[in-house]
Structures are given as C-alpha cells and as structure tokens.
Image (spheres, rainbow, N blue to C red):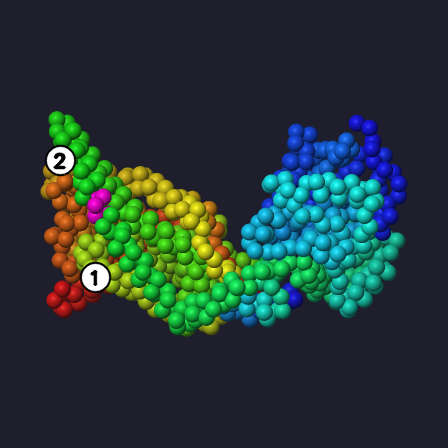
C-alpha cells in the first residue's frame, strides 16, 4: 500500500513525528476498559500475537486502514499507572518512551472516569501525542451519567472521542480524529495535573541536579517526577547515572520529602475530580435523595435493626406461606409417588435393590430435593435485597450493632459472610492480624447460621410447629446471633482490648431490581444446590442406607442402629431417640443430610410423607431441642477442613469442634428440659 | 487528599463512602478510586468478601459470579 500520510510538520505544541513509514498507534488503558475489543475491531485478522521481549506478557500488534491509509497499532498491556509496580506498567511506559508511537490512544471507561483517568493523568505528562477514547458510553448512559465529551476535551486539552466499542459506535469519529491528529489538523494544549507548591520547589531542585545526566529516551521532567514518586526502576537508573555527590543531594531531597508520593498522586486525583465535575452530570438527583431518605431508616442504629429483623421475619413468612406447602406437596406427591412407583416396578427385584432405590436414593436425596422451593425463596429474597442495594445496609447496621456489643469490626465482616456459608467466613478471618484474635474469631464463626442450617430449620419447623413455625425459626436465628454476639463481646474484651480498624463500605444507590439478574442468581444457586444434592448428599444417604442394611438386612440389627443405640444416652439429655441422634451426626458432611438421614430412616411411602411421620413420632420439646442443636451443632466437614487449613493446627480444629459440641448439647438439653417444664 | 483518606482509615470505625467523600470534599466514586490506588501502592490492604476461594462450599460457583460489595480496608 502506498504511503498516503502527510509529511508536513504538525502545528500543535506536542510534536507529531509523522513518518515516512506507516504511523504507529498505541492503545493504552486500564484492564477491562475495552481495549482489546477496539483492537480486534480495528485489526480483524491483520494482527499478530506474541510476547514482549523477555516477558511473559502478551504482545498484540496489527494494522488497519482508514480511507486507504494504513496504520500500525499496538495493544499495550492493561495498566493502572506508569509507575514500575508491575511488568505491564514497565512495558507500557518503556514502549511509549522508547518506541515513541505517533499517537497514544488512552481508552477510559466512561461509566467510571474517576478510576480510568489516573492513567491519563500520567500519559498526558509525557510528550507523546495523546487522544482519549471515552468507551462504554452506553453503560454510562444506562447508569444515568451524562458526559459532555467536548467539555472533557477542553478541560484535558487533548482530543476526546466518545465510543461504544462493543457496538462499533463512534468509529467514524475515531477514524476522522486519528487522521486529523496525525495530519496536524487539530491543535491541542494538554492541561497537566499540578503538584503542591512545596513539592514543586523540590521537583525544580531535583531537576537542577539531574539536568544533563538523564539517559535517553527518558524526559528529565518525567524522571524527576518519578524520583519523587519513589519509582524503584528510575531511582536505580539515576543512582547509576549521577555522579556520587549529585546522587547524594538528590537522595537527601527524596528522604526529606518521602510524602511526595502521596502529594503527587493527590494532585492527580484533584485534577481528575475537577475534570469529572466539569464534564460529567449526575442526573439521578431524585434517586440519590430517595436513597438518602430510605437510609435515614435503613442504616439507623435502632430502626435499622428493627427493619433487618422484620425482613428476616418476612423471609420466613414467605418461606412458610409459599415454600412449605410446595415442599409438602413435592414430599407427598413426587417423593411419595416415586417411592410407590419404584416399589411396584421393583416388586420382583431383590429386597436390597428395592431398599437401595426406595429408602436410600428416594428417601434420602428425595427428601433433600424437596428443599428446593424453600431454597429458591431464600435465593430470590436475598438476591432481590442484594440487587436493590439493601444487603450493604444490613451489613452496616449489623456492624454498628456489634460495635455496641463490643465486637471488633475486623471480626464482623467474616462473620457476616457466614450467613451464606461458614467456609468463606473462616477464610475471611485472614483480615485479622493478631493470631490469637483470628483463631478465636474462627472459633465463633460456625455459630453464624448458614443457608444450609436455615434451610433445615425451614423444612422442619413447619413440620413440628405448624403456624408457629415463623416465630420458632425467627427466634432460632436470633438466639444463634445472641450466642454469637455474647461470644464476640467476650472475645473483644479478652483479645482485642479496644483496638479499632476502619470498615469502609461502598453503599450502592437503591434501584429497581433487575429480574434477569435475580433470575440468573436463582438459577445458578439452585443448580449448585442440586449438584450438592446429587453428590455429597447422595453419597451420605447411600452410606447411611448401607449402614442401616448391614450386616444382614435387618434394620434392628444393623451397624447404624448399634451405633445409634451406643450414642443414644447423650441424645436422651436433649430428648432425642437414636434416630434423631444419628441424623444429627450425619449432618457433619453437609447440614442437609440431617433431613436425608431422617428420610432414609423413616423411609418414603405414598401413604405418609416424611413430615407426617416425623410429627407423629417426636414430641414438641424434642423437636425444639433438635432445631436448637442443629443451629449450633459442630461445623460441617468443609468448614472443619478450612479451619484446619487456616489454623494449621489439629489442636485448634478439635477445640473448635469440642466447643460447639458442648455449646449445642448444653443449649439442646437446656431447651428440652425448659420445654418439658413449661408443658410443651 | 490521599493523606487525609489514610488518616481516616487509621482512625478506624465504620464508615460509608458517601460520608467519607463529604469529609474529603469529593465524590464517593473518587474515594473508591483512591482506596484502590492506595491498595495498589501497598499502603492499605483490602478484604473483599468471598475473595480468594470458598473451597468446599457447595454454592461456591454461584457466589463467585456475584461478587460482593462489602469491603474492609486497613492501613499497613
């Protein structure tokens, strides 16, 4: 292709070296701002992928044409700044300084200019021509931002091109801008970030010292700035190139101004703040004021807690009003029906095969599968609350409450995670610096009622307590929290001794929940639950069935009954027979196994669903004690494995199991005898 | 502004980005950008919920697809 580029000198202050060869463009930007999308769109198949010399970072380059004129383009690695913090940042700045592309195109996320513009603040300080692409304009519009590119262009002093690369919107303006810039048809005067006056004087002093000693291709101004920022590569470079007395003088200045790093970065953020104020309009005033009004109640130290408790009650009400009847229907019609069908089909099959299918698979896993409607309600309600922005408020309110109770903020976040699953709660304790404090937080983390425990309660509470199930479930969750807070308060007094840490939360604006997001969340979590039912729970159900069959197929002589009878004396303290005791123990691999085991032990029949059988078998006092123990019982196997991993100690792990065993048995026995005392 | 932000983190307590932004005379988005900058610079560290793995959890796949919004920052 012939060269069709003008060779006339550019008229802008930043010299554009339009070359005899095809012009070279460099795409720079933070990760995930759409750089690669634009690169792929521009180059199509005309691209080559390799590695940067001496690095394992991918190098992508290619070419494209505009009106018959060819341009080379390099997709630089995603970087947040030009400081030598990572190989990507070194590659980017070395390429720009050494290869001197004809135009650097900085891509920024229009929906988050505050984050994206920091790299621009650095790029604009180099003497390489710069243009800014405001990508993701569609996302910015969806999120309610109105951006004025011409205002941003005037404030930056470099060309600004709005674009939505994923839809190829703004490409014509981009092509036109590139041609005009490279042909010198657009004049720009970059407006650079300022640094504080005292540091400006230091910068000038450093410049005096290093003048004439900075090796090519590094600009002296930029090197002086990077020295003040404490850039290790540039510091070594200057140390090797300056005469000793000059280096000593520079080093003294750097030592005296070790806060310059923050001052320079602050200057850039103030510059970004000014740009955003000038060019971005946040029209969602109504939404912000609605958020503020709602937050007066939602994050209030007292009313916030009342609202949270009310929402928890509402979740249980929905569960028992909608979920439980569906669950009961599934249990009676589907599980019971399947059991009846399997009995008929396998009438001629050996007894153990029929028992394996009916009692082991259908009785065990089937019982757990009927949880699904209850789980879907949990997932839907919590997904809805999360999507509309409430969950962050719940965390904020709970943290305030725990501070009142004396629990340290550092313990709170991991504990809050435990509502989903205790495993991330244990992993989350890594945030706690002090080893004893961390270990003690690990000790109490399994007291947080996880989704699986709440689901077991949601299944069993209506079975035993009918219309009072909502109050029983609500009370059980609050009682668990009370136990946790008491333990936490004790922990704080003994270990943290008033130490404080910052807990900074990003509060999203309230917004109308997106049904697709919630639908996707329900689908993903339901699939995960079903996967768990088909693996861990099925496995455990089969083990329980096998133990109930061996050695001779008679349940009364089985290993399971022998084991159950052996530990039954402990269960009796809490009003349990051997079956409830075994069900509790088998909840160790996964909490839902408690129901699966009851399903295996009581079998599935078309005549009576599991719920009916359980109601007629156990007293209210035993049932209440069983639910209390379930909420406080030893952590599940996955949690124990993580406790072992995080504490790196079997001693601590066993102590944890022992502690929860003691707490749960004591609470179960207490509740059972109290219930008997009041005549339940 | 960054120095002031670090001082706020060192002071401790439960803060919310819009309150912090009002104290610093800027926007919550800029506060979030600065917090991430300080984290990258190694001056503060952040803990993001369900971050580096929920090994063994049956719901881990689903949780990872919905990253949390709760973050705890502390100065080093």
Q: Is residue A675 above or below residue A120?
A: below
Disc 1 residue crowd, few under 14, some 14–19, many 20+, Cα 10 Å: few
Task: Determine which quarter of the picture holds residue A20.
Answer: top right
Going 83% across and 41% down the picture, which residue do you hit?
Answer: A183
Q: Residue at x 33, y 51 (%)?
A: A377
Which residue matches tag 1? A468
Would you call the spot at circle 2 few (<14 residues within 10 Å), some (14-19), or many (20 or more)? some
Q: Which mark is residue A5?
A: none
Which image quarter is the N terminus of chain A in? Answer: top right
Residue A122 falls within the magenta-colored stretch = no
Q: Is residue A386 left or right of residue A190?
A: left
Residue A194 point in image, percent of width and height: 75, 62
Task: Report how many numbered discs are placed on residues in the image.
Answer: 2
Q: In this orientation, which residue lies closer to the viewer: A204 or B20?
A: B20
Q: Is residue A290 left or right of residue A659?
A: right
Residue A551, compared with residue A133, is above or below; it is above
- Residue range in magenta is A327-331
Label 1 residue SS: helix
Residue at (80, 52) in percent of width and height: A188
Residue at 29% across, 65% down: A479
Quadrant (top left, top right, bottom left, bottom right) of the C terminus of chain A: bottom left
SS assignment for the magenta stretch, majority = helix
Name the residue tied to disc 2: A553
Relative horizontal placement of residue A94, taking residue A288 as reference (left or right):
right
The x, y position of residue A6, in whole percent, is: 85, 37
Q: Disc 2 vs disc 1: which is toward the camera?
A: 1
> Considering the numbered disc 2 on the image, is that residue within a helix, a strand or a loop?
loop
Examine the image and state in which quarter residue A667 appears.
bottom left
Q: Please report contact status of discs 2 and 1: CB closer than 8 Å, yes or no.
A: no
Q: Earlier in the sequence, mark 2 or mark 1?
A: 1
């Amino acid at each position: 292709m012939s060269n069709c580029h003008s060779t006339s000198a550019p008229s802008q202050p930043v010299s554009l070296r339009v070359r005899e060869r095809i012009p070279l463009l460099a795409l720079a930007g933070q990760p995930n701002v759409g750089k690669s999308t634009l690169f792929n769109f521009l180059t199509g198949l005309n691209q080559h992928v390799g590695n940067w010399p001496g690095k394992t970072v991918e190098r992508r380059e290619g070419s494209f044409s505009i009106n018959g004129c060819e341009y080379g383009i390099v997709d630089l690695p995603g970087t947040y700044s030009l400081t030598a913090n990572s190989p990507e940042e070194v590659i980017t700045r070395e390429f720009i300084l050494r290869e001197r592309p004809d135009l650097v195109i900085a891509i920024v996320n229009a929906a988050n200019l505050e984050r994206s513009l920091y790299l621009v603040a650095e790029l604009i300080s180099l003497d390489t021509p710069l243009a800014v692409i405001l990508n993701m304009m569609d996302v910015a519009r969806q999120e309610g931002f109105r951006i004025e590119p011409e205002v941003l262009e005037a404030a930056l002093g470099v060309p600004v091109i709005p674009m939505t690369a994923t839809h190829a919107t703004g490409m014509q303006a981009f092509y036109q801008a590139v041609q005009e810039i490279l042909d010198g048809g657009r004049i720009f005067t970059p407006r650079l970030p300022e640094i504080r006056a005292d540091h400006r004087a230091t910068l000038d002093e450093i410049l005096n010292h290093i003048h004439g000693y900075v090796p090519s291709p590094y600009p002296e101004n930029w090197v002086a700035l990077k020295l003040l920022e404490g850039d290790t590569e540039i510091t070594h470079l200057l140390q090797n190139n300056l005469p000793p007395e000059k280096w000593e003088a520079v080093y003294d200045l750097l030592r005296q101004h070790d806060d310059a790093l923050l001052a320079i970065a602050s200057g850039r953020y103030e510059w970004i703040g000014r740009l955003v104020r000038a060019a971005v309009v946040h029209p969602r005033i109504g939404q912000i004021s609605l958020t503020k009004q709602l937050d007066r109640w939602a994050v209030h130290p007292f009313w916030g807690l009342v609202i949270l408790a009310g929402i928890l009650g509402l979740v249980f009400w929905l569960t028992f009003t909608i979920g439980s009847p569906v669950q009961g229907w599934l249990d009676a019609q589907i599980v019971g029906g399947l059991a009846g069908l399997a009995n008929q089909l396998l009438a001629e099959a050996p007894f153990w095969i029929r028992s394996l299918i009916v009692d082991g698979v259908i009785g065990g896993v089937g019982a757990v599968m009927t949880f699904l409607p209850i789980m879907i309600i949990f997932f839907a309600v919590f997904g809805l609350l999360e999507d509309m922005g409430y969950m962050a408020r719940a965390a904020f309110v709970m943290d305030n409450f725990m501070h009142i109770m004396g629990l340290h903020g550092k313990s709170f976040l991991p504990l809050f995670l435990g509502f989903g699953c205790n495993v991330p709660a244990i992993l989350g304790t890594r945030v706690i610096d002090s080893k004893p404090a961390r270990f003690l937080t690990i000790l109490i983390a399994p007291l947080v009622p996880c989704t699986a425990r709440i689901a077991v309660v949601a299944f069993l509470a209506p079975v035993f307590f009918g219309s009072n199930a909502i109050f029983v479930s609500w009370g059980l969750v609050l009682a668990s929290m009370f136990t946790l807070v008491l333990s936490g308060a004790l922990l704080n007094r003994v270990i943290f001794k008033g130490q404080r840490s910052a807990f900074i939360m990003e509060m999203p604006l309230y917004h109308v929940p997106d049904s697709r997001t919630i639908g996707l969340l329900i689908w993903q979590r339901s699939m995960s639950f079903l996967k768990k039912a088909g693996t861990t729970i099925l496995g455990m159900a089969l083990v329980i069935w096998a133990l109930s069959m061996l050695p001779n197929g008679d349940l009364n002589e089985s290993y399971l009954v022998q084991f159950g009878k052996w530990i039954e004396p402990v269960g009796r303290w809490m009003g349990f027979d051997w079956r409830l005791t075994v069900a509790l123990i088998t909840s160790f691999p996964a909490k839902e196994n408690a129901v699966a085991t009851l399903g295996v032990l009581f079998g599935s029949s078309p005549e009576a669903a599991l719920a009916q059988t359980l109601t007629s078998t156990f007293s209210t006092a035993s049932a209440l004690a069983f639910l209390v123990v379930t909420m406080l019982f030893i952590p599940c196997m996955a949690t124990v494995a993580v406790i072992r991993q995080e504490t790196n100690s079997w001693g601590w792990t066993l102590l944890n199991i022992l502690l929860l065993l003691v707490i749960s048995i004591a609470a179960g026995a207490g509740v059972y005898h109290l219930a008997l005392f009041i005549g339940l | 502004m960054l120095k002031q932000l670090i001082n706020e983190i060192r002071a401790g307590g439960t803060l919310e980005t819009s309150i912090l932004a009002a104290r610093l005379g800027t926007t919550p988005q800029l506060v979030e950008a600065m917090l991430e900058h300080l984290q990258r610079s190694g001056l503060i560290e952040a803990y993001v919920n369900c971050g580096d793995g929920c090994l063994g959890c049956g719901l881990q796949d689903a949780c990872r697809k919905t990253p949390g919004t709760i973050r705890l920052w502390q100065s080093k």
